[in-house]
Amino acid sequence: MAAVTPDEHERQQDGHCRARVNLRPAAARPFGAAARAALKDTLFPDDPFRGLGGMPPARRAWRVARYFVPALDWGAGYSAASFWYDLLAGVTIASLSIPQGISYATLAGIPPVIGLYSCFVPPLVYAVMGSSRNLGVGPVATSSLLVASIVGGKVRASDDQRLYTQLVFTSAFFTGVLQAALGLLRLGILVDFMSRPAITGFMGGTAIVIMLQQLKGFLGMTHFTTKTDIVSVLRYIFHNTHQWQWQSTVLGVCFLIFLVFTEQVRRRRPKLFWVSAMSPLLVVVVGCVFSFLIKGHKHGIPIVGTLKRGINPSSISQLKFQPEYVGVAMKAGFVSGMLALAEGVAVGRSFAAMKKERIDGNKEMVAFGLMNLIGSFTSCYITTGAFSKTAVNYHAGCRTAMSNAVMSVCMALVLVALAPLFRHTPLVALAAIITSSMLGLVKHREIRRLYEVDKADFAVCAAALLGVVFSTMITGLGVAVAISVLRALLHVARPSTSKLGRVSCGSGAGAADDDHAFCDVAQYPGAATAPSILVLQVAGSPVCFANAEYLRERIARWVEDEEKAVAGEDLLYVVLDIGGVTAIDSPGIEMLREVHGELERKGMKMAVTNPRMAVAEKLVLSGLAELVGESWMFLSNGDALAACRYTLQGSKHGGVPPV
Amino acid sequence: MAAVTPDEHERQQDGHCRARVNLRPAAARPFGAAARAALKDTLFPDDPFRGLGGMPPARRAWRVARYFVPALDWGAGYSAASFWYDLLAGVTIASLSIPQGISYATLAGIPPVIGLYSCFVPPLVYAVMGSSRNLGVGPVATSSLLVASIVGGKVRASDDQRLYTQLVFTSAFFTGVLQAALGLLRLGILVDFMSRPAITGFMGGTAIVIMLQQLKGFLGMTHFTTKTDIVSVLRYIFHNTHQWQWQSTVLGVCFLIFLVFTEQVRRRRPKLFWVSAMSPLLVVVVGCVFSFLIKGHKHGIPIVGTLKRGINPSSISQLKFQPEYVGVAMKAGFVSGMLALAEGVAVGRSFAAMKKERIDGNKEMVAFGLMNLIGSFTSCYITTGAFSKTAVNYHAGCRTAMSNAVMSVCMALVLVALAPLFRHTPLVALAAIITSSMLGLVKHREIRRLYEVDKADFAVCAAALLGVVFSTMITGLGVAVAISVLRALLHVARPSTSKLGRVSCGSGAGAADDDHAFCDVAQYPGAATAPSILVLQVAGSPVCFANAEYLRERIARWVEDEEKAVAGEDLLYVVLDIGGVTAIDSPGIEMLREVHGELERKGMKMAVTNPRMAVAEKLVLSGLAELVGESWMFLSNGDALAACRYTLQGSKHGGVPPV
């Protein structure tokens, strides 16, 4: 029997094969259509406007409006029954907002009343625009300290309080611009690059740093270092023992014990959530009364000081866009904005998951952005979804974002009527409140679990934590993000290659035909391989500039190894299974062309299995499909193997080398 | 018939199935071993020390030495016949080195003799350490201008030539340190992130910028702007028409026409390569004689000026490590070092590909690093593999790196004897030489091909080119690298998901059994899908923090769409084909857990197909394998489908919902 010529082989195959690799329709897809499809899938994975085309204009507008303003969505069917739940939840989180607002504003180095302002306007905006039903909005400790550490690097609050505060407002403005822009551009994708382990480490480190800062309050100190790393802070504290005032310490420890106790109560009995929710306000009230009665500020217990009555004044004229200051305000706004976004979206997602709801990252960004933008015009500083408030809101049984509106109204009442009463609040009470809320943020259990399940994730987490504690918050965050991004890039630079073998698997009872799979021979040592034929799988990443050279080397080594292994017989066919390769770029195509050339020189034939649409397109356009030959492109590895065996037999009988 | 319980199902399956998903050995693999294997595959894809264990110590040492010092490798079998080829090639490239050395040093703003020094020591180092047999080593235009633009930002050459030159030496030192470190740490991977389209665009833009700089020489101008962007340069030239000297222009155009003509001769007849190789030296010699005879520098033809006799003096004491200067030197060294590396490795690779040889990126980096490090001690500035020299070397028939040593010896002779003769070289001759060699770097054909094959690659290329031409070289390079990295990250953030259907394919003639494949239904509209069962494939990227949320949303949407599509029947099984997923991290595991939970709530069963070793490990460690149930993990989609159908039948007959 003579050798099979390429033509004959193709003809014979045509007769038997019921399906061929589909190259044509893909190649005909114009660039515009392909790019639009890719863009849509990248930026609109949720495809919000499906089936909108067929609707009448009015309904369509209403549907779009409901999409962009979630309040219209839940407001349309809002019932009185829901309102009572939201009222209770709103009042509860308002009671938490007063002490938190004052505390975090102190942490940020701005007048305490700004913390209260920031619990009035932003929650109102979020109630209208936010897509989460549980999120409680307000200032948070991490962003407060982060803004303080960046703005404080330019202007010290103790030197020029007015300018410092203006820069904090301006940074909130830039936060708003950034967040809204990311949301409108559908770049929620960027937040995804702050990996969970990175955020866990960063939060843990920040919690430690924030607790260290509270030593100022606990020790009744009146001055403090502007550094945040553990070494500087401890050195400052022990070099300034003369500032220590034991009265503050005693009071603070009592408060802290009380707060930790009520938190424990909530943990054991979730129904008593209001005990821990009310306790910070109780601490503040008790502290106020106590320091008012004993005139605490004259006996080693520093107090908050004047709090003006009245709701938020406009702060539009206070935004500083002079070239001298705009840089630091942008830096503070962008960095803390990204972090606040990551925190807010993460908090929202975890509670939404508990209620089995879905929240939309891009909509959340727009809501956060508007909240900070409008906030920066109305004397508010950076706000986001806060963990403690959200937890209380959730446990208090909130139904919709209406609870944020209720909180907002409560805060307005506090501002116009009660604010001055809080001027006697001892600073140590605030320190105790902050410290107790930070204790839960050092998630030692999660860190230990990371260590057990994934050492690399643990390394990212530890790097972020140590970076924050021993250097600066920016360093910690930078290191964590850099490691995360590098790991992601490494996946692209080093796709997986493996030699496949055939594993038979009877397909359960009930099915007539036997089945088989092609699996990694390293994982299934019993997998059957054919002599003269090497099946290689490339998977795990698109074939692109970042890995083309690597793949060329790695494939060459597989071929060499296989040649040695089958010393007796010649290796004649190399089947590349690229079914798991989702895209290929021009350096990738060049690489395949080189591999094809190298194999041809060695007298081997290259076959390609199951190229996907995007890959097939490029193979045709670049002429590689023609070079390899369409009859050497197969749908399955089994098919490829059979074809190799068939040509092999033909050539053996005829005594001529295979085509 | 009663419904099949999970236990029964498993038992029945056990009876029929000859292979199961292999979870055990993978789970037993300790972290250390897994990390070592991953690290080895990432950093040592070529596995240089295979089979070294069994050798006697002396042979082992010899083999390691030969690995690290390629000269020992080729030197051992070096023959006289090879030497004659290398001698010819070496002399030819030396004749090219003289004008190029002087030209590029002028471009870098340093005394011309340093360009000659740089063609003496570095090639000698490369001859010993380099792994490429064709590469011609020396200064290159891009790095020269890049160093000049960075160092010039700190100190202007016209203000303090001595300090400027010292900073250039120091930057070469840092280039050497960076390159050697990258090579020793096996981080060749970093160079892979400078994609070919990015480099094409950057080189094209740089060539245009360099040609613009040559207008100084062509117009005989004595002063010039330090900016490099096209707008500034053209504006300067047309604002300073009084500096123009027509004598230089006439001479320059004659030289340029001659050089372009000889280049055309070489293209048409590759055997006449020596015509174009010698022509720059001829231009210099003719120019020297001409300007000497007519006293050109007095008639509008500026000349090079004094060139000291003698080989490289030591420059160790000239390296500046003062905090004031070390920053700019490091920046210049690192940026131009990365670029020189990318250029050198790319040049080496393309010529090695023509000779069907392989060069080792990491070894090349060490060689380049040592070359620049030793160079910075001996009055040389940054050198790398140069395209023009390599091309001439290759065509002149070089056999080994010995040709670089020959060139080095020739340069030493020039330095001790002939250097002063070149002082009459007209600057316009150098401008003509540089311009003619830049013409080939604007690869308009390759750019057009990119436009045709891959619009995204074309965009990267265009961004780099326009960035360099209209802004600065650093901007262009930064933009190109940033776009490349973002594209790579996008692949990770948005893996591909597709619905699979069964496509039958008869497996050519000669094989007994029929075969089938599971393919994307969008690509193969005829693919058969089963009602009640949805087969989803995830591929193209590891499942990780960057895409976990996206995948959750995307899978949920596939399930929703499928539910709508099969309106009549219930969707009961979702089979996730993760055979193309090479790794999974903890957020990825959480995502799968959530998907499993969501499907369970909807009354659907999740099955998993063909998890790979690294993934199976994590599935077991995290307890997800137990949650899904081992009997719901299959080797192939066919197997999974059959099992689903079987349980479905059982449940239908019994009238109870499936397990």
Image (cartoon, coloured by chain):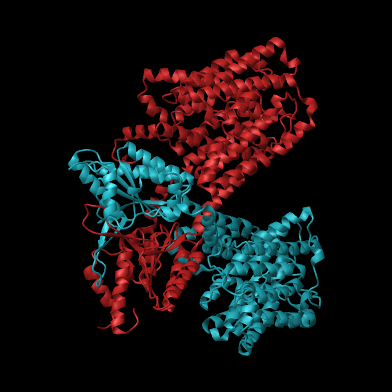
Chain colours: A red, B cyan
Judge by depth and name the residue closer to the eye, B187 or B353. B187
**Is residue A181 or residue A613 the one in the foreground?**
A613
Residue A46 visible to an observer of this rendering: no
State which quadrant residue A176 falls in. Answer: top right
Residue B536, above or below A365: below
Residue that protrudes farthest toward the top in the picture = A293
The quadrant of the picture occupied by the N terminus of chain B is top left
Quarter of the image where one finds residue A501: bottom left
Q: How many marks?
A: 0
Q: Position of residue B145 (x, y in %)?
A: 67, 64
Q: Quadrant of residue B330?
A: bottom right
Residue A187 visible: yes
Closest to the observer, B186 or B17: B17
Return the x and y of residue B82 as percentages of the image width and height. 61, 87
| Quarter in which the C terminus of chain B is drawn | top left
Q: Nearer the viewer, residue A283 or B391?
A: A283
Q: Is residue A203 above or below residue B305?
A: above
